Amino acid sequence: MTEPLATNPAQPDWALPGYLEVKNNHLHINGIDAIKLADEFDTPLFVISAPRIRHNIKQLLEARTHHPKLKLCFASKANNLLGVLRVVREAGIDVEVNSGGELFRALRAGFRPDQIEMNGISKTEQEIAEAIDAGIYTINLDSPYELELVEKVAARLGKRANVTVRLVAGVGTRSHAGLQTALYTSKFGVSPSQAREMMLRTLERPDLVNLAGLHIHVGSQTPDPEPYAEAFAAMWDHLQWLHGETGHKLQHINIGGGIPVNYLRDFTHAAEISENERAMLGANLSAAEMMENAIDVVRASAKKAGVEHLLDELEIVMEPGRAVIADAVTILTRVRNVKSRPETGENWALTDAGYNLMLSMVMYHWYYHAVNASRAEEDHASRYRMAGPLCDGGDVYFDLHGDGHLPDCRLLPGNIEVGEVIAMLNTGAYTMSQMTAYNGRPFPAAVLIDDGGKVEVVRRRDSYEDLLINEL
């Protein structure tokens, strides 16, 4: 997502005007001193920016200039905190869920059933029943068996289910292998031949299922428009084929999510990260650019076939998650220990947040930029081995594996002291929703900053008693 760098030369490259700024040597988030937040609410602390969420959604909606019938469904797996879902709903977009639990959260957050679509590759009969009973926008089918299960449940409930077939079409991207979800080697979706069989099958029982659309998700943090165009073309071929064979019109095509976030606004560590990783982490592809490329690919085909009306009438669904929430959250963590290794000459800064809150650091060796919020104005030029508090040698913020995914160290001001606050930027996606209480560490609090400097606790800090809440 394209974002201008700070225009004030006194502001560092990671700054975002009006949102992340340096004032009086401290990091400020939407005008609020990060150190005061850490002192008042303790650390670790998730700090969520409601204005930034709205800003990101507004940018994503610019894709409507290329197709006005665009439905945005926030991928709630990225961050399903009720406070976040509330801001997303109030910003005027819809939601994608991946389980019965996420469906429960979405309904509790105030989304109408027609605003909710459901993914998932191992849906239970209960989850399908809950989705059909609620009357949600669509259930994305992941296999022929799942279609049979939906028909069975719909017959039992006496209700008609809206369904979409999830296609996998061999589309690759330049993201991590585990984040590519449209390859034939992926666990997601059905192959083209299976998809056509399923589409025809749905039309045999219109009393039980309404075939509403087709779906492809190419993966997360996709830096290029070409995979989206290829995926859109594959779905369009199926749409045209079905219409030609049966006259059935699909209501929507779902292009999935994966619009990237620029995690490398500050290029300080770029030289220590591999070229491919830099291209992915520093991607600036916007939803509007993606949509323009995807629409251009199919418009010529539609015009040639004389079915432009099918494209014009079609609703296009997108499932942005990371692009909505990643840079809208900052984790504040306090330095709890410092030490040096005379044998190696290395200095260590040990914090109270590790991969228990940022699991992607070990799953994908993901990079989150670190800023000393206590001395944000000072030169970040001293090398530190920065690590979290867990009893695990992999709980570190630097490259243990020599594969170029992470830098060899972290650059911070010199002479770090215990008590200073480190801000981990761009930590909104797949952090809170994946956090763990490993080592008996209670989940942290989360605060939401809104316009006018309003600060609201949207998740209280867990106690030790909460660690035992379901144990007998």
Image: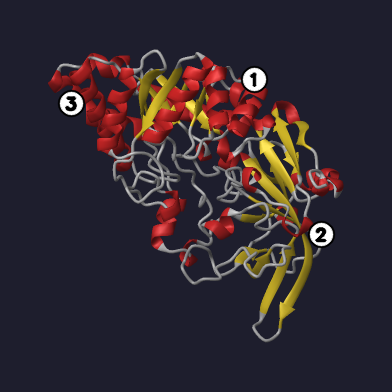
Residue at which label 2 appears: 419
Residue at which label 1 appears: 110
Q: Are marks 3 and 2 in contact (CB under 8 Å)?
A: no
Name the secondary structure under disc 2. Answer: loop
Looking at the rendering, which quadrant does residue 17 occupy? top right
Looking at the rendering, which quadrant does residue 188 occupy? top left
Kindly identify the residue that appears in the image at 23 percent across and 31 percent down: 297
Image depth: mark 3 or mark 2 in front: 3
- In three-dimensional space, the C-alpha distance between marks 1 and 2, rounded to whole angstroms, equals 40 Å
Residue at which label 3 appears: 300
Whether residue 289 appears in this view of the structure is: no
- In three-dimensional space, the C-alpha distance between marks 3 and 2, rounded to whole angstroms, equals 61 Å
Kindly identify the residue that appears in the image at 79 percent across and 67 percent down: 337
Q: Is residue 44 above or below residue 393?
A: above
Q: Is residue 62 above or below residue 37?
A: above
Residue 388 position within the rendered picture, expressed as x and y whole percent measured from the top left: 70, 62
User: Is residue 344 found left or right of 400 in the rendered image?
Assistant: right
Residue 361 position within the rendered picture, expressed as x and y whole percent measured from the top left: 58, 58
Mark 1 is on which residue type?
Answer: Gly
Q: Are marks 1 and 3 in contact (CB under 8 Å)?
A: no
Mark 2 is on which residue type?
Answer: Gly
Name the secondary structure under disc 3. Answer: helix
Q: Earlier in the sequence, mark 1 or mark 3?
A: 1
Q: Is residue 33 above or below residue 303?
A: below
Q: Earlier in the sequence, mark 3 or mark 2?
A: 3
Circle 1 packing at 10 Å, graded few (<14), some (14-19), many (20+), is some
Kindly identify the residue that appears in the image at 55 percent across and 50 percent down: 13
